[in-house]
């Protein structure tokens, strides 16, 4: 999965098996298509993924501290915004 619109990305976790196995999903915010998926939800892998995609300027995400720290570690220049779904729920 790839995208040409990398500056605007959503990052969220999802369950392979609820309460046991989680992954990380990256969504292109312009096309709303999945860009990539990590089979785990660990900060180091999220940091590595973000550092391999330096054009990212803005990330929407849930309130997860894990993702907040990973994004800040990858690049303090990436603007982090709470995503609409999590704000409304």
Image (cartoon, grey):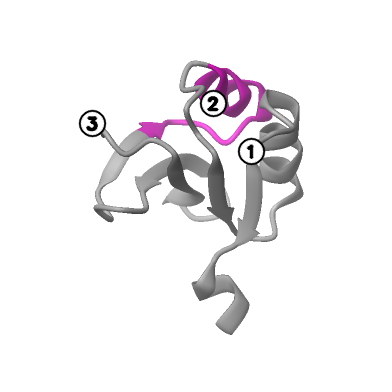
**Residue that sits furthest to the bottom in the current view:** 88
Mark 3 crowdedness (10 Å alpha carbons): few <14, some 14-19, many ≥20: few
Q: Is residue 69 above or below residue 64?
A: above
Residue 85 pos. (x, y %): 50, 74
Which mark, by number, is residue 1? 3
Name which residue lies at 76% across and 48% down: 65
Marks 1 and 2 close (CB-CB < 8 Å): yes
Name which residue lies at 66% across and 43% down: 67
Q: Is residue 69 magenta?
A: no
Distance CA(mark 1)–CA(mark 3): 22 Å
Q: Is residue 32 above or below residue 34?
A: below
Mark 2 crowdedness (10 Å alpha carbons): few <14, some 14-19, many ≥20: some
Q: Secondary structure at mark 1?
A: loop
Distance CA(mark 2)–CA(mark 3): 15 Å
Q: Give the extent of the magenta segment.
A: 37-51
Between residue 1 and residue 78, name the one nearer to us.
Answer: 78
Q: Secondary structure at mark 2?
A: helix
Which mark, by number, is residue 50? 2
- Which numbered mark, 1 or 3, is in the foreground of this view? 1
Residue 39 location, quadrant: top left
Name which residue lies at 50% across and 34% down: 56
Q: Is residue 4 visible?
A: yes
Q: Main secondary structure of the magenta part?
A: helix
Distance CA(mark 1)–CA(mark 2): 10 Å
As drawn, is 78 to the left or to the right of 28? right
Location of mark 1 (residue): 78
Q: Secondary structure at mark 3?
A: loop
Residue 18 pos. (x, y %): 49, 55
Q: Which circle's residue, 2 or 3, is located before the other in the chain?
A: 3
């Amino acid at each position: 999965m790839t995208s040409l619109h990398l500056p605007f990305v959503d990052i969220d976790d999802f369950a392979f098996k609820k309460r046991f196995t989680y992954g990380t999903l990256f969504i292109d915010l312009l096309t709303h298509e999945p860009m990539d998926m990590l089979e785990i939800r660990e900060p180091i892998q999220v940091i590595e993924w973000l550092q391999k995609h330096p054009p990212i300027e803005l990330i929407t995400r849930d309130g997860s501290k894990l993702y907040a720290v990973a994004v800040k570690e990858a690049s303090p220049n990436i603007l982090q915004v709470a995503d609409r779904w999590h704000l409304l729920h």
